[in-house]
Amino acid sequence: MSEDTLYDMWMRGEVDDLLDLPYEGLRVEIIGGRIVVSPAPTVAHACILSDISSALTAASFKDPDFPWKSTQVVNLYRRSASPSCIPDLLVLETDVLNAAGDAEAPGLMPDEIEMAVEATSPSNFEQDRPPTGGRRLANPNKWSGYAEVEIPYYLLVDRSPKEAKTTLYSIPDQSTGAYLHRESWEFGETIQLPEPFNIEIETCRWRPWK
């Protein structure tokens, strides 16, 4: 009988027991074959995600045929060194999300996702960002993992005081684990998400972490 992998244990919800975590509310993910434990997000972090969700909801009210819906802190499954993780927010077709809910699915698969969203935190921002200086990451993180599984769009809200901007990554390259195109907006600017979303997201209340 083959030995359990970290992924197998994560799929069964047993990694928390293995770690003997001191309290509930910590986020446990398998990223690049490593266990990554993160604290619960702050209120400011959560408000940013709420603004993004609200923009999608508002678009659906204006246009009954608007197909997109968001969901937060849902497992994203993947059998490899790429993330088996809990993204801050996922955007997918409403019918796909409803079908997964009706089926009592424990999580979602990459081919069901149109856009992954992450907002950085002081404790784990390196897991969300692309590598610097054009180098390739020694261990996959969320940025490279989302590209490897070909999630079409990745929206990164970087709350670092040195960045304070939002970047939309697109054109994932599976072979290199990289996104080939990006477009950025400074905090305070209105995000213009292109087709297939075609929505605006106001960022006037978004602030870097302190």
Image (tube, rainbow, N blue to C red):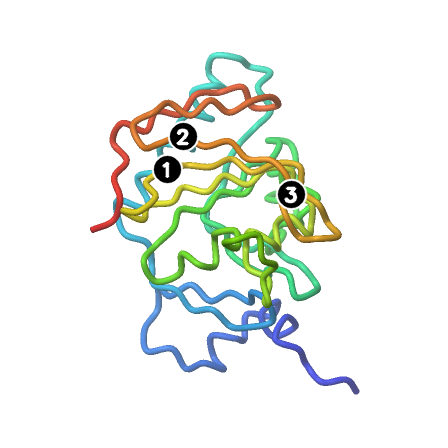
Q: In the picture provided, is 106 more to the left or to the right than 19? A: right
Rendered view: 188 above or below 75: above
Asked if the residues shown at circle 2 and circle 3 are in contact, with their CB atoms under 8 angstroms apart, the answer is no
The residue singled out by tag 1 in the image is 165
Q: Return the mark for residue 151.
A: 3
Identify residue type, mark 2: Trp
Q: In the figure, residue 57 lies in which quadrant?
A: top left
Asked if residue 98 shows in the view, the reply is no
Could you tell me how far apart the alpha carbons at marks 2 and 3 are, in whole angstroms? Answer: 21 Å
Residue drawn at x 47%, y 79% as measured from the top left = 17
Query: Which residue type carries mark 1?
Result: Lys
Q: How far is the residue under mark 2 from the one under mark 1?
A: 6 Å
Q: Which of the marked residues, 2 or 3, is nearer the chain's N terminus? A: 3
Return the residue found at the far right. 1
Whether residues under marks 2 and 1 lie with C-beta atoms below 8 angstroms apart, the answer is yes
The vertical placement of 48 against 160, above or below, is above
Q: Which of marks 1 and 3 is in front?
A: 1
**Which residue carries the number 2 mark?**
185
Label total for image: 3
Can residue 128 be seen here? yes
Label 2's element? strand
**How dense is the environment of label 2, judged by Cα within 10 Å: few (below 14), some, or many (20 and up)?**
some
- Mark 2 / mark 1, whichever is N-terminal: 1
Residue in view at x 75 percent, y 52 percent: 175
